[in-house]
Image: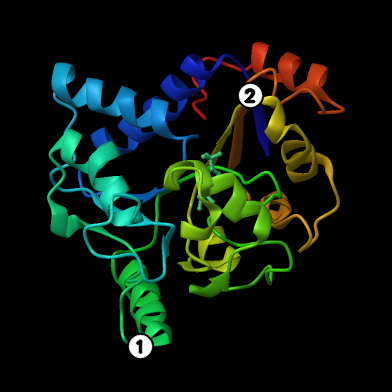
Amino acid sequence: MEVVIAPAEELAVLAADAIEALLRRRADTVLGLATGSSPLKVYDELARRHAEEGLSFAEARGFMLDEYVGLDADHPERYRNVIATEIAERVAWPAERVQGPDGLAADLPAACAAYEEAIRAAGGVDLQILGIGTDGHIAFNEPGSSLASRTRIKTLTKQTREDNARFFDGDVDRVPTHCLTQGLGTIMDARHLVLLATGRHKAEAVHQLVEGPVSALWPATVMQLHPHATVLVDEAAASRLQLADYYRQTYASKPSWQGL
Ligand code: GLP
């Protein structure tokens, strides 16, 4: 696992560089997309490169991590709509090439199985962007999630609903109680995991993710078992890392030919 500690703007550039390198190598790259505030600067940087440098998403495929259950099709916080606004429309990504689990399906387990199959049929995810919840969840894999889980329905914790109430006019009662989410096993199948975290409120989750024992109590710790995982954090999110100096030293002396 590589840990990079840098200001948020630099982290976004590093993540965008990794995505651009993939897209330039293979136009039909498969990207894993995350919602939440953590990837927003990356999406801004990709939109800039699309507008100013012609970076094309026309042939790429996108798979979202998760979706609320039951939000109306036109609800602005429905993750499908969030991803459309935050990234897909800004880079002229054809709508049919970006998919998410269907939180409005009549048969939710069937929708989850179909989503797993769609990811497999696309050849799997090349690079998965991730954020992390303050309780250590990735996607919506809350504490207690099986480390081998696949796409399924989950109940959101009180903490996550409170954290996300800011997107629902601060009213926790308007945050859905359930979601569909890629499982930890699904996420672990992606070929490169790139997690972004900024702010002191993420420091404990980041410490556990990088340095804690692998445990369902801190679901993101499963990433320690991934052969290619990158953790991009600012100083505040890195403030509880025991080996922060070593991560800094490693990154400072990294050969320039080695990307993320
Ligand atoms: C949500 C999303 C996660 C995201 C997390 C952190 O619950 N389902 O994918 O990583 O929140 O959000 P933020 O980046 O806004 O802190």
Query: Taking 234 as reference, is 80 left or right?
Result: left
Q: Out of 232 and 85, give the one closest to the viewer.
A: 85
Residue at the spot x=43%, y=48% of the render? 168
Q: Which residue is mark 2?
A: 4
* Front one among 78 and 250: 78
User: Residue at 48% across / 56% down in the picture?
Assistant: 190
In the rendered structure, the answer to whether residue 214 lies left or right of residue 198 reads right
Q: Secondary structure at mark 1?
A: loop
Residue 96 spot, x, y in % from top left: 15, 59
Q: Is mark 1 within 8 Å of ligand 1?
A: no
| Above-or-below relation of 22 to 156 | above
Image quadrant where residue 16 sits: top left
Q: Nearer the viewer, mark 2 or mark 1?
A: 1
* Viewer can see residue 253: no
Q: Quadrant of the N terminus?
A: top right
Q: Amino acid at mark 1?
A: Asp
